[in-house]
């Protein structure tokens, strides 16, 4: 089975880039399941029904979340309703809108346990341990109920992502990072069959500071004065993802990075 994962889709520039490039990628690699991180999908912060539906129409099957998942009320309502296949990180406290994992069917009929998790180091939220949360999820679901498992670990610190990787080595099919918006060059499958990359990267503007007009972020960094984020709509656009091949026994065989610039 082949899973295509797209890193944080950032606002309209990100959605337009996905619309331009995803059909060709689907033709080229024929994924059985497409997952994307949606925390920035609407206006760069948060989610709404229209933008999720727009990406579902292009073939994306399920969406993971992050620190921006709850940035607008429509996104919260979306998570509360459970009508669309949208997850928020599982390790938010009990009572938080939405759910952090679900089992979805791939095009080839395989059952994939998709889990969204958020890290704690250098992250603004006070959340439960992602380590404990993942252990609890894996205990609560019978291994017979799914054929493969996929974890989006949304975080800033490489060390925390690597620690989660090795803690659950051989216990899940894939752990891929998101949140930094910059793709890392460490995609690898462990000897126990868990695919891993520290960060998948983002979909949206390349000539920017992680999607935002660079002059705005430069002003913030130089002066510390408050700024309003405006997404960069000009210049080159990028699509970043990972492509993971998983065997019948749920072990990853291969992970390849996807990186396209237009
Ligand atoms: Fe993001
Ligand atoms: Fe994030």
Image (tube, grey):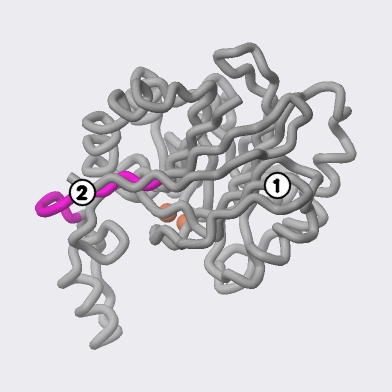
Circle 1 packing at 10 Å, graded few (<14), some (14-19), many (20+), is many
Magenta region, residue range: 232-240
Is 23 a magenta residue? no
Q: Position of residue 261 (x, y in %)?
A: 23, 48
The residue where tag 1 is placed is: 194
Q: Position of residue 92 (x, y in %)?
A: 67, 51
In this picture, is 60 found above or below 208?
above
Q: Mark number for residue 148?
A: none
Q: Are marks 1 and 2 in contact (CB under 8 Å)?
A: no
The residue where tag 2 is placed is: 237
Q: Nearer the viewer, residue 47 or 203?
A: 203
View extreme (left): residue: 234
Please state if 108 lies on the left or on the right of 45 as rendered: right
Circle 2 packing at 10 Å, graded few (<14), some (14-19), many (20+), is many
What is the distance, in whole Å, between disc 1 and disc 2 at their CAs? 30 Å
Q: Position of residue 244 (x, y in %)?
A: 56, 38
Q: Is mark 2 within 8 Å of ligand 1?
A: no
Q: Residue at x 31, y 61 (%)?
A: 210
Which of pointers 1 and 2 lies earlier in the amino acid sequence? 1
Q: Residue at x 28, y 82 (%)?
A: 221
Q: Nearer the viewer, residue 34 or 48?
A: 34
Q: Residue at x 73, y 37 (%)?
A: 251
Q: Secondary structure at mark 2?
A: strand
Quadrant where the N terminus lies?
Answer: top right
In this picture, is 25 found above or below 27?
below
Q: Is residue 222 visible?
A: yes
């Amino acid at each position: 089975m082949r899973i295509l994962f797209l890193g944080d889709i950032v606002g309209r520039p990100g959605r337009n880039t996905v619309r331009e490039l995803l059909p060709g990628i689907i033709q080229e690699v024929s994924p059985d399941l497409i997952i994307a991180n949606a925390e920035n999908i609407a206006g760069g912060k948060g989610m709404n029904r229209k933008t999720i539906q727009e990406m579902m129409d292009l073939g994306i099957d399920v969406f993971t979340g992050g620190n921006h998942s709850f940035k607008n009320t429509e996104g919260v309502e979306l998570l509360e309703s459970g009508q669309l296949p949208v997850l928020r990180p599982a390790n938010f406290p009990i009572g938080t809108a939405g759910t952090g994992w679900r089992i979805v069917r791939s095009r080839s009929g395989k059952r994939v346990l998709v889990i969204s998790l958020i890290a704690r180091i250098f992250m603004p939220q006070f959340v439960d341990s992602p380590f404990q949360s993942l252990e609890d999820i894996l205990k609560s679901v019978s291994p017979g109920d799914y054929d493969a498992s996929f974890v989006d670990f949304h975080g800033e610190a490489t060390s925390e992502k690597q620690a989660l990787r090795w803690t659950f080595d051989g216990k899940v099919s894939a752990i891929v990072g998101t949140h930094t918006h910059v793709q890392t060059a460490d995609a690898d499958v462990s000897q126990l069959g868990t695919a891993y990359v520290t960060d998948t990267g983002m979909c949206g503007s390349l000539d920017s500071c992680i999607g935002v007009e660079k002059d705005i972020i430069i002003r913030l960094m130089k002066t510390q004065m408050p700024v309003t984020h405006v997404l960069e709509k000009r210049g080159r656009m990028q699509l970043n993802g990972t492509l993971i091949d998983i065997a019948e026994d749920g072990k990853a065989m291969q992970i390849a990075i996807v990186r396209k610039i237009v």
